[in-house]
Amino acid sequence: MTPKEMALTAAKALDEKKGAAISAVEITDLTSLADYFVFATGSSNTQINALCGAVEKAMDEKGVPVLRREGYRDGTWVLLDYGDIVVHVFSPEAREFYSLERLWSDGKPVDLSGVLTEN
């Protein structure tokens, strides 16, 4: 599975659980941290955990295990590290505060129109 396919799989899983403001950025040429970041917002700690669970399940089904999880206890920002991609699921306040999309704005936005459902 390519890193882009991984990012699209994560975005689709987030969308299926009603994640908000889902986006992805390709950062291959900017850092060695990962090839893609995927972002989403959950409306509550419960939804944030459900979103992360959906991503983990979808990736497991594709044979891609999560390498590291961070932030489950806090519940305002959960990070799922898959090596080639990193999934960030935020509360609305944490997403605005950390503004990772702004920090990585030199990256290439990923077109998710074929993956996300219309709201």
Image (spheres, grey):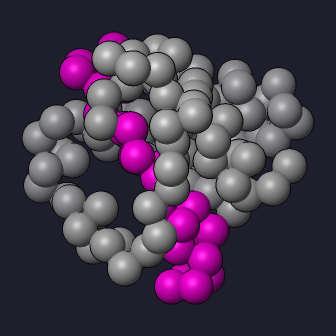
Residue visible at 69% across and 62% down in the picture: 84
**Depth order, front residue of 16/77:** 16
The location of residue 24, given as percent across then percent down, is 47, 52
The location of residue 1, given as percent across then percent down, is 86, 49
**Which of the 4 image quadrants contains residue 21?**
top left
Residue visible at 73% across and 33% down in the picture: 59
- Residue 83 falls left or right of residue 11: right
- 35 over 16 or under it: above or below: below
**Total numbered badges shown on the rendered structure:** 0
The location of residue 9, given as percent across then percent down, is 67, 36
- 16 over 35 or under it: above or below: above
Report whether residue 66 is seen.
yes
- Residue 114 falls left or right of residue 117: right
- Residue 47 falls left or right of residue 33: left
**Which of the 4 image quadrants contains residue 104?**
bottom left
Q: Is residue 86 magenta?
A: no
Give the magenta-colored segment's residue range. 22-49
Could you tell me which quadrant the C terminus lies in?
top left
Residue visible at 73% across and 57% down in the picture: 3
Residue visible at 58% across and 34% down in the picture: 114
Report whether residue 83 is seen.
no
Q: Is residue 40 magenta?
A: yes
The location of residue 33, given as percent across then percent down, is 57, 74
